[in-house]
Amino acid sequence: MEKIGIGDRLQIQCYKHNGKIHRAWDEAVLLDMKKDYMVFGNNRTTVTEAEGNTWKTKEPAIMYFFKDYWFNVIVQLKKEGVTYYCNIATPYIIEEGTIKYIDYDLDLRIFPNGSYKILDRMEYKYHKKIMNYSEDIDKVVNGALEELISLYKEKALPVFDAARNLRYYEQYKMLKESEKSSHLSES
């Protein structure tokens, strides 16, 4: 694995089962490294879709990528409260300064009031058919969704601690501020 440290800026690349890139984010700043996951932050970062069109994220985000779980979690710090966008996806790898994973369509959105909704079931069925997901992949993906819902309900992951995520965001802002002042002192 590549040697990376707190404050390092990486990119994120999300692929589909067929190996084609689906979406890429131009920034993820490393905030924390645990033995089984990594935490990154970004804000108003550019996202490039597979077709080439780009857009910017609207709010600060804290992102959790896991070594063993088949999901990742994007904590969106919205004005109306903390929202969790959870992608059912392979565990991440890091290559050439880029976090990479395969997205398996199903998503779980958890709203500020604590309710949740499973998203993109039709997209999953469609891709399962056209990309020939194996029975094993289907079991792993659906098992990961069930596990994620269970972990959320039990509050068994630090991911779902709003205060922790706000502290990570403060750390992200400080890293960005020190990056900005070091650029200014260089010029």
Image: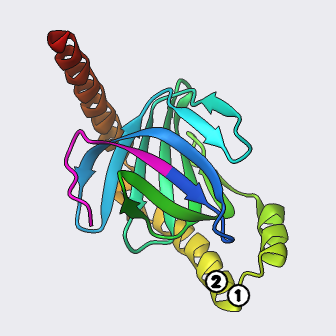
Farthest bottom residue in view: 135
Inspect the image, locate mark 2, and give the three-letter code of the amino acid beneath it: Ile
Q: Is residue 5 left or right of residue 28?
A: left
Q: What percent of the width, then of the height, locates residue 149?
A: 56, 66
Which residue does the image show at 58% across and 37% down from the upper left? 47
User: What residue sits right under mark 1 in the picture?
Assistant: 134
The numbered disc on residue 168 is: none
Inspect the image, locate mark 1, and give the three-letter code of the amino acid beneath it: Ser
Task: Give the alpha-carbon distance from disc 1 to disc 2, as whole Å.
Answer: 5 Å
| Main SS category, magenta section | loop
Q: What percent of the width, then of the height, locates residue 182?
A: 17, 19
Which residue does the image show at 76% across and 58% down from the upper left? 120
Question: Observer-nearest residue: 120 or 153?
Answer: 120
Q: What percent of the width, then of the height, locates residue 101?
A: 51, 63
Q: Is residue 6 above or below residue 70?
A: above
Question: Observer-nearest residue: 185 or 151?
Answer: 185
Query: In the rendered image, which quarter contains the C terminus?
Result: top left
User: What residue sits right under mark 2 in the picture?
Assistant: 137
The way the protein has been coloured in the rendering is: rainbow
Q: Is residue 2 left or right of residue 57?
A: left
Q: Looking at the image, do the residues carrying marks 1 and 2 touch, with CB atoms under 8 Å apart?
A: yes
**The residue tagged with tag 1: helix, strand or loop?**
loop
Which residue does the image show at 52% across and 41% down from the upper left? 25
